[in-house]
Image: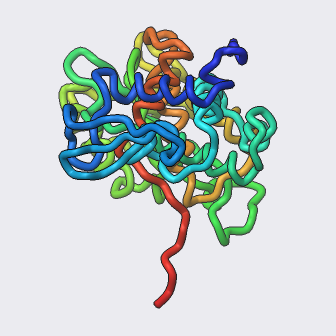
Amino acid sequence: MTINLTDPVFTDETKAREHLEAIRWPDGPTCPHCGELDKVYRLSGKSHRPGLIHCNSCNGSFTVTTGSVMESSHVPLNKWVLAYRLMASSKKGISAHQLHRTIAVTYKTAWFMAHRIRESMRPTDTSPLGGGGKVVEADETYIGRLEGQPKRRAGWGHKNTVLTLVERGGRARSFHVAGVRVADIAPIMRANIASKTALMTDEASHYGEVGEEFKSHETVNHSIDEYIRGCVHTNTVEGFYSVFKRGMIGVYQHCSEKHMHRYLAEFDFRYSNRIRLGVNDTERAVLAIKGAEGKRLTYRQPRSA
């Protein structure tokens, strides 16, 4: 990961705003309130904050952060752009502590920024993985500890369960699930894998019933040290878990249950937009910024009556 920290988009807020506007509005500003493209104009002068745009159609005002995860943030835009680049480029993630030291914000601010960027990375394309002539591997792993559960020396009943579907040569999609019963995983697999797909898993019995619904279902038996048989294996999804666990254990170290899906979205995003698929670090950061539009994330609690 090489980042030119002297690039003006990382040091100058005006340049960063222009960068964000070019990504969000390649054809010119569009009102996020009503969708107006023509009857918008920039407000200037000391009485208006930088980047403010007015829409004559709905009489509303907006900036490039309106209607995105950056809305209402007081963090300088150049720091947002750098944070996006760091999170998009770090294969195993970047901790909030490291982020706060690197971009010079408080730890609390870095934590909020990181979660908002993960929300930007959450995929909006829910089309099924696989299809005719394609292979999807499915597997599950266990990480962390369920809230209220004591730590055990063996077994996984006290841990969070993660189910991941990986299309060979394509995208990854991960889910925080309640367990590995057929009722837990079958609906997810039906909704996220095309029926004409060749499914490959390990020998776990919970894949047997739902596996019959796809074009084919082949397994490898890890219990007898069988890890590959011709083209039948789950090495791709296990490779995904290798990076995921190194990030979660080595970088993030702790993740609560309620935020697990956000970390999964982050690792899925980087995997699904990796170098091997022709997406470099700069392009990946741009895709993450594009994903900020139309999403909000706030932890403010409503006041009680």
Q: Nearer the viewer, residue 169 or 122?
A: 122
Q: Nearer the viewer, residue 38 or 113?
A: 38
Residue occupying the far right of the picture: 101
**Residue for point 56% across, 23% down:** 15
Residue occupying the far bottom of the picture: 305
Task: Locate residue 189 relative to residue 63 in the image: left or right.
Answer: left
**Residue for point 21% across, 41% down:** 35
**Residue 134 visible in the picture:** yes
Q: In the rendered view, how is the structure colored?
A: rainbow
Q: Percent position (x, y) of residue 268?
A: 48, 33
**Residue 205 visible in the picture:** no
Q: Nearer the viewer, residue 205 or 272?
A: 272
Q: Tell me the quarter of the picture where residue 37 sits.
A: top left
Q: Percent position (x, y) of residue 21?
A: 42, 28
Q: Tell me the quarter of the picture where residue 24 sits.
A: top left
Task: Locate residue 229 relative to residue 196 in the image: left or right.
Answer: right
**Residue for point 35% across, 26% down:** 136
Task: Locate residue 60 relative to residue 144 in the image: left or right.
Answer: left
Q: Percent position (x, y) of residue 195?
A: 19, 32
**Residue for point 48% across, 25% down:** 18
Establish if 27 lies above or below 33: above
Task: Locate residue 293 relative to residue 84 in the image: left or right.
Answer: left
Counting labels gives: 0
In the rendered view of the protein, which quadrant contains the N terminus?
top right
Q: Percent position (x, y) of residue 65?
A: 45, 42
